[in-house]
Image (cartoon, rainbow, N blue to C red):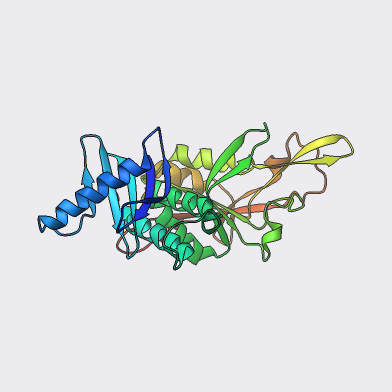
Amino acid sequence: MDIEGVVIFEASSGIPLYSRMKGDTDPSLFSSFVAAIGHFSRELRFGGLSSFTTEEKVIYLAPREKTITALIAPKKKEYQEAYSLADELGRRFEDRLGTEKTSQPSLLDGFGEVADEFLKKIKNPFVSRVSGFVSEQYGGTLTVEARLYKQDGTQGKVDILVDTSSTAEKRFDPGDTLGKNYIFVKVLSGVINRLHMIDFIDSLDGFGTGVMDKDGLAFRPYFPSRAVMVGKDIDEGATEFLHRLPKDKKQIYIDGTHVFAGLRLKDIPKDSRCYIDIWRWKEDEGPELAVI
């Protein structure tokens, strides 16, 4: 879901307490407009207002005791999670606000980071649902839409990065030569096909960091210990491709030999393996591990 704005305003007065808007929309004007619509809705005995639409936008409203959180999105097919996520964002804001009636800059320290994480979930609710499952299945610390450096110096995105290290200080540690504490997760809302599979596996050695050795700066890959793909199903082409990969006790893996082609690193074991898990996502029955 493309979120174009979020405004948290005082329920009683309509005064905006926190806002992040695209363009030059005035948060005060917007919150006053929404508060007025809510007032008329109650006066006409239509009940509380949870959302409304214009010709181009959908406005979600998550009212709480002190505040109302509004999300502005293009008028497209919507997701049920939007309301619950907006409500939780409002709760987090009220927890910071405490008993204060007006927002103070010190009360909002760090709230932008909280809002960013929630906006990521709201933009892609399927990834949000999958991240909850991944956390239960694999443990560790999750980062949604993790940005990691690539060998050419640009940044790439991993849908979900799982860090299974025991201490937060080890995250993205250059000394973690092969990312043995990392799991890369690719999330697809449709069917996993052969091209999806090849692109994902080819990307597993593409993220890392630069390290100094005697010959200068070298690229050290974050070759993960496990790669996970989650999709609604897996087609025949993807299944055939997976059948060609080596197995260890029926567990498919790729080894690290091709990772080191052209790299000067000599302290990385060549027998490193990244195991592959493929999950079929079934909304009503729960995810199912595909047996290849």
Which of the image's four quarters has the N terminus?
top left
Left or right of residue 112, residue 173 in this image? right
Left or right of residue 264, residue 119 in this image? left
> Residue 210, position in %: x, y?
75, 40
**In percent of the image, x 75 and y 33: which residue is there?**
262
Q: Nearer the viewer, residue 281 or 89?
A: 89
Residue 27 image-quadrant placement:
top left
Q: Nearer the viewer, residue 276 or 13?
A: 13
The answer to whether any part of residue 283 appears in the image is yes
Q: Nearer the viewer, residue 217 or 195?
A: 217
**In percent of the image, x 71 and y 58: which residue is there?**
170
The answer to whether any part of residue 80 appears in the image is no
Left or right of residue 167, residue 160 in this image? left
- What is the residue that sits farthest to the right in this orientation? 214
- What is the residue that sits farthest to the bottom in this orientation? 99
> Residue 228, position in %: x, y?
51, 53
**In percent of the image, x 73 and y 36: which residue is there?**
261
- What is the residue that sits farthest to the left in this orientation? 44
Query: Disc count in the image?
Result: 0
> Residue 248, position in %: x, y?
60, 58
Left or right of residue 274, residue 199 in this image? left
**In percent of the image, x 46 and y 37: which residue is there?**
195
